[in-house]
Amino acid sequence: MPRLLSVAFLIVLMTAAGPAMAQAPAAAQAPAAPAPPARPQAPTRDPHTSGYVAAKELPDGAIPGATADGNFIIGPTHTRAPEMTAQEGVPQGYVNNFTMSSADSKIYPGIARDPGTFGTPDPNDPARLIVTTSHSAPYTRRVSVYVPKQYVPGTEAPFLVGADGPDRLLFTALDNLIAQHRVPVMIAISIGNGSGDAQGSERGLEYDTMSGLYAEWVEKEVLPLVEKQYNVKLTKDPDGRATMGGSSGGSCALIMAWYHPELYHRVLTYSGTYVNQQWPSNPQTPHGAWEFHEHLIPNTSAKPLRIWMEVGDRDNYNPNVMRDDMHDWVLANENMAKALAAKGYHYQFVFARNAGHTDGAVKQQTLPEALEYLWQGYPIASPKN
C-alpha cells in the first residue's frame, strides 16, 4: 500500500508540474500588450426622455409597417421574423466569395493602429483625438456577392452594398422577400472591412471619414470586379442602389449616399455611429459624423434619400477616452431623426427597448420590414402566372 501511495503521489506531482514546465518557455517571450480596460455598461435610456423625438409606442412584439414614415418604439421582446429562416420551396440565391488585397488598391493601401493602443484627446480640443501609433499596414478583405435565383444573367439589376460582410442574415431575408415580391430582384454585395476599429485603423478610415472616398472606392475597385466575375449588370440608377451597415458601417452607409446622391438613394442603418469618430480630423467636418445632425442636414437642402435607422435603449455611451459630449449613440440617432423630420425626409426611425449596440435579436426581428420600407417606390416585378 505505501508503494501504491508513493506512485500515486508522484503522478499527482508530475501532473501538477506539467503545465508549469510546459509554460516555462513562454515566460521568456516578450510580455503581451495590456488588455484594454473593460468598457462600462451603457445605461438604459428612456425613449420618452425630454429632448428626444416624439415617437409612437407599439405593442410588445409589433414593428412598424413597411410604408410608415416617422418615429417608433418597439417593445422588449424581439422574436425572429419568419423571413430570417430559410423556407422550404423558396429559391435560394447563389453566394459567391472573393478576396481583395491592399496591394491591389490605389485608394486604400492600408493602415493599422498598434494593438493595445488608442489615442489621447487634444488638450486644446477635446473633440480631436491624437493617435500616434497608426502606421501603414497591409490587409485582405472578403467580399460576398449574393445573386438571387430569379436574376437573369447579364440584365441590369438594382443592388445593395453592405458593410462588415459577409452577411448571411441579409441573404436569407432577401431569398424570402424576393420570392414574396416584397422587394425587387436585387443583388447584394457584402464587403468586409479593412481590419481594426475606430480612429487610426483601416476600418475607421474607411467608415468614419466624412467624404465621398469610400463610395468612390466601391465604384472604382469593387463593382467592376463583381460585374466581371459573376456576369451581372449593376444599375446606374441611384434609385436602384442602396447602402446598409451597423455601427460605423451604418454611418458609412449614410456617408456614401450623402456625398454621392447621384450614386445611392436608399440607406439602412443599425446603431449608426453618428458621433465624433472621424480620424484624421477634418476642419470642414471637425465633429465627424456628429456633423450630420449638428450642421449638415439642417443646413443643406433635402437630398433624394430614403432612410431606415435603428438604435437600442442600451446603445453605446462614451466608450473611449474622449469626453466631448459627442459619443452618445442614442442621442446621436435621436438627433438624426429630428433633423430628418425637420427637412421632410422619408425616413423610419426605430427605438428598440431591451437592446444593445447593433443588437442581433433586433436585426432578426426587423430586417425584413426594414428592407421592404427601404425599397418603397421602386418597381417590383409581378409574379408570373
Image (tube, rainbow, N blue to C red):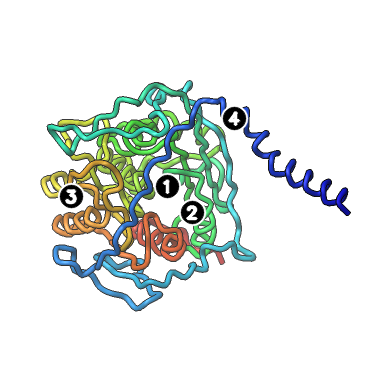
Label 4 vs 3, first from the N-terminus: 4
Which residue is nearer to you in this view: 72 or 26? 26
Residue 136 screen position, x and y as percent: 39, 21
Disc number for residue 293: 3
Tag 1: amino acid = Leu
Secondary structure of the residue carrying tag 2 is helix
Label 1 vs 2, first from the N-terminus: 1
Secondary structure of the residue carrying tag 1 is strand
- Image marks 2 and 3: residues in contact by CB distance under 8 Å: no
Q: Residue at x 22, y 56 (%)?
A: 331
Q: Is residue 5 left or right of residue 311?
A: right
Numbered disc in front, either 3 or 1: 3
Residue 132 screen position, x and y as percent: 30, 25
Quadrant in which residue 96 is drawn: top right
Which residue is nearer to you in this view: 49 or 383? 49
Q: Could you tell me how far apart the alpha carbons at marks 3 and 1 are, in whole angstroms?
A: 24 Å
Q: Which residue is mark 4?
A: 26
Which residue is nearer to you in this view: 238 or 198? 198
Q: Could you tell me how far apart the alpha carbons at marks 1 and 4 are, in whole angstroms?
A: 47 Å
Instruction: Please tell me whether residue 280 is drawn above or below residue 181 in the rendered image.
Output: above
Q: Which residue is mark 2?
A: 170
Q: Residues within 10 Å of mark 2 (few under 14, many from 20)?
A: many
Label 2 vs 4, first from the N-terminus: 4
Q: Could you tell me how far apart the alpha carbons at marks 2 and 3 are, in whole angstroms?
A: 28 Å
Residue 357 shows in this picture: yes
Q: Could you tell me how far apart the alpha carbons at marks 2 and 4 are, in whole angstroms?
A: 43 Å
- Image marks 1 and 2: residues in contact by CB distance under 8 Å: yes
Tag 4: amino acid = Ala
Q: Residues within 10 Å of mark 4 (few under 14, many from 20)?
A: few
Q: Which residue is mark 1?
A: 160
Q: Is residue 64 left or right of residue 152?
A: left
Tag 2: amino acid = Leu
